[in-house]
Amino acid sequence: MTTRFQRRVAVLAVTLLGGVVSIAHAQGAEPLEVTAALPAARATIGTSHSDTSTAEFVVGGLRVILRRNTASDVVAANLFLLGGVQQQTPATEGIETFLLAASERGTAHYSKDALRLAMNRTGSAISIDPGDDWTVFGLRALRTTFDSSWALFSDRLMYPTLDSTEVELVRAQLLSAARQKRLHPDAELRAVADSLLFEGHPYALSTEGTERSLASIRVAALRDYLTKQFVTSRMLLVVVGNVERARLEALIRATLAKLPAGRYNWTPPPPVTSNRRALVVERQPLPTNYIIGYYAGPPATNVDYNALRIATAVLSGRFFTEIRSKRNLSYAVDAPFIERAVATGGVYVTTVSPDQTLRLMRGEIDELQNDLVDPAGLRRLVQQFITDYFMKNETNGDQANFLARAELYQGDYRLADRFVDDLRRVRPDDVRRVAREYMRNFRFVFLGDPSKLSRDYLERF
């Protein structure tokens, strides 16, 4: 598998330093039904209780989770196209995003202009959110116009025209976005870091595509992908809002249930084997230096998943205190936790003093790995984390995603009801254990002035 990282090696010079891969920029280079509960977001923060308004059922081969929420007239319907980057190859990176974007340019029943007018008239919106584990094709609609909005939504998915002229216009837009993305240090940093950690793994592929892949995908490939990949066995529909089950079932039977079933079976990607440290250094004339280091975490089915989530929150708070508040060495410092079927953790900072900042980061990681955090402080942090998490996930669309993650990552949407309890079960010794187990073998990317970077610090991560 050729990854973004491997393609970048063509313009990077490679050396080995003390077991750390160092890459410096080269000169001149260019019908079972289940009813169960998911509590409302704010209610979940306090207690777990039954909510029989959530149901799971199958319509014509399409799995559906419906959470009836009568408190709002906005209906969120998120269709998850499962597999994400596992459905792609280096030659087809971004093809799903490309196809869904092109569907906006007209369908068998609606011209491009008719689609836009109808969307405005119904007050609805359709979004495309590509992810490593799935792509979300989302509909936000009003209860009163949901039937009409659904017709537009399903038509785009089932019958896109894929006119060659319109496809070329979409291609140009996607290529421009890919080029612009490279100009933003943060986007470049994270793209290279993913490729570095996940070399040879599906997560190394780009959900939005690269300039090379987007330029090479032809209309015939889009049509072939539509025929082979848009099958009901690869779909999960999660709807949250004030819509009745019978109404939703009727809409699905008339539309998406007519798609072929296919033979897809969702499986998460394999674990990541990360047994070596690595470093990519790219010289760029920037006012500050951008640094990110990733390490491989556990799969979402592992009990360590939430413990590591909390451990990174503890570490992030310590970074903020020591690096930003006390010493003013950075305006942006974090210990990210990337929520995927296989977790990723890391460290991130922008700073004019890389060596001093990295020394402080390493010290905070050492303390987390060797000492127990204060139990009372941990309880307060967990409660604050829960509050913040649900405040960021309180819309109908966010709740749809929350249900889907439990269904796909843990095998049962009802396990979403245990999320808060799982977090509260994390103890100080769990934090120390996962810090020791996973916070090692970092793979770093550095953008900025290499003369300000001492590799001695990075070799300790």
Image (cartoon, rainbow, N blue to C red):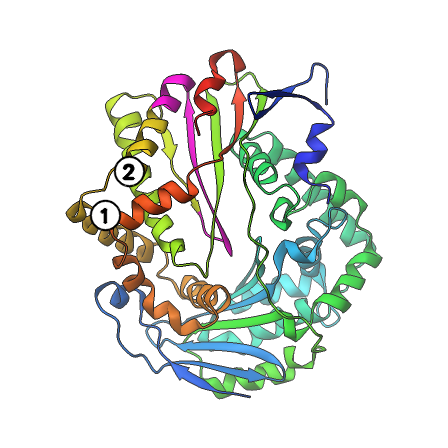
Write the start and end of the magenta stretch as one range: 338-359
- Per the image, label 2 sits on a secondary structure element best described as helix
Residue 185 place in picture, x, y as percent = 54, 29
Q: How many angstroms separate mark 2 from mark 1 (CA)?
A: 9 Å
Q: Residue at x 66, y 44 (%)?
A: 200
User: In this orientation, which residue lies closer to the viewer: 153 or 77?
Assistant: 77
Q: Which residue is at the far left? A: 376
> Quick check: 112 left or right of 420?
right
Q: Between disc 2 and disc 1, whose residue precedes? A: 2
- Pick the quarter of the image with the C terminus: top left
Q: Is residue 331 visible?
A: no
- The residue at 42%/19% (across/down) is 354
Viewer can see residue 238: yes
Q: Which amino acid, by three-letter code, is at mark 1?
A: Leu
Instruction: Give above or below for 429 relative to 62.
Output: above
Q: Residue at x 52, y 77 (%)?
A: 64
Q: For the N terminus, which image quadrant?
A: top right
Q: Residues within 10 Å of mark 1 (few under 14, many from 20)?
A: some
> At which x and y percent is residue 110?
70, 69
Q: Amino acid at mark 2?
A: Gly
Q: Residues within 10 Å of mark 2 (few under 14, many from 20)?
A: some
Tell me where residue 3 appears, x and y as whole percent.
69, 40
Magenta region includes residue 350: yes
Q: Residue 317 got which mark?
A: 2
Reading the image, the residue beneath label 1 is 381
What residue lies at 76% left-to-right and 40% top-to-bottom? Answer: 212
Q: Position of residue 260 (x, y in %)?
A: 72, 78
> Mark 2–mark 1 contact, CB under 8 Å?
yes
